[in-house]
Image (cartoon, rainbow, N blue to C red):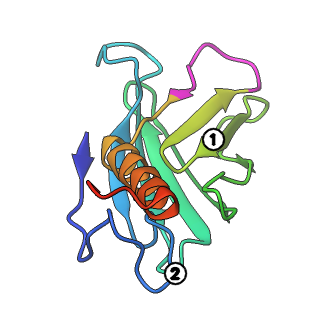
Amino acid sequence: MVNYASSKDLTQETEGLPYWAGHQAILNSLATDENFEGHISLSMKYSQDGKIYYANGSYVRVPALFDCTGKIDEEGNLEEQDCTPSSWWGHKRTLMGHVTNPIIENSGHGTTAGGEFPDKELLRNETAQKLARECARKKYKGC
């Protein structure tokens, strides 16, 4: 997984923005076999206000590119969007999930996989955000 550098500290919510605002990452599916027909490279970009995602990617062994855009709710859930490559009539692929773990679902026909795309950087920051909120709420002295 390759993550692009971010100009802000993702462990801090800045000006009320969610921790994923402005984040960019290139993610690989949990299936790590590069020779697997369905191996996917997924690029996720989030708007500066954290309300919109932009996804694009490719199937490594199959000549197919895809892109889609959708909304993100306040909890980081991605709006389901059709991300089917234009050349795949009848072979629908749907993007869904959470900013920490986008999912491409093979909701159509065909053998090429979907998969989960965990974003380890955002997963670490989600954990840090939860801990910071818990500390503030309970007023722990050690936080």
Q: Amino acid at mark 2?
A: Gly
Q: How many marks?
A: 2
Give the residue at mark 2. Answer: 16
Q: Quadrant of residue 62?
A: top left
Looking at the rendering, in which quadrant would you find the N terminus? top left
- Give neighbour class at mark 2: few <14, some 14-19, many 20+ (Cα, 10 Å): few
Q: Is residue 32 magenta?
A: no
Residue 93: x and y in percent read: 68, 35
Give the structural element (helix, strand or loop) at label 1: strand
Give me the residue at 38% from left, 13% from top: 36
Q: Amino acid at mark 1?
A: Gly
Q: Is residue 51 above or below residue 127?
A: below
Give me the residue at 43% from left, 61% from top: 139
Looking at the rendering, in which quadrant would you find the C terminus? bottom left
Mark 2–mark 1 distance (CA, rounded to whole Å): 23 Å
- Give neighbour class at mark 1: few <14, some 14-19, many 20+ (Cα, 10 Å): some
Q: Is residue 136 above or below residue 40?
A: below
Left or right position of 41 against 55: left
Give the structural element (helix, strand or loop) at label 2: loop
Q: Which mark is residue 97?
A: 1
Residue 81: x and y in percent read: 73, 50
Q: Which mark is residue 73?
A: none
Residue 116: x and y in percent read: 51, 29
Q: Is residue 43 above or below residue 13?
A: above
Give me the residue at 45% from left, 35% from top: 117
Left or right position of 102 against 119: right
Quick check: can you spot residue 128? yes
**Residue stretch rendered in magenta on the structure:** 107-115
| Circle 2 or circle 1, nearest the eye | 2
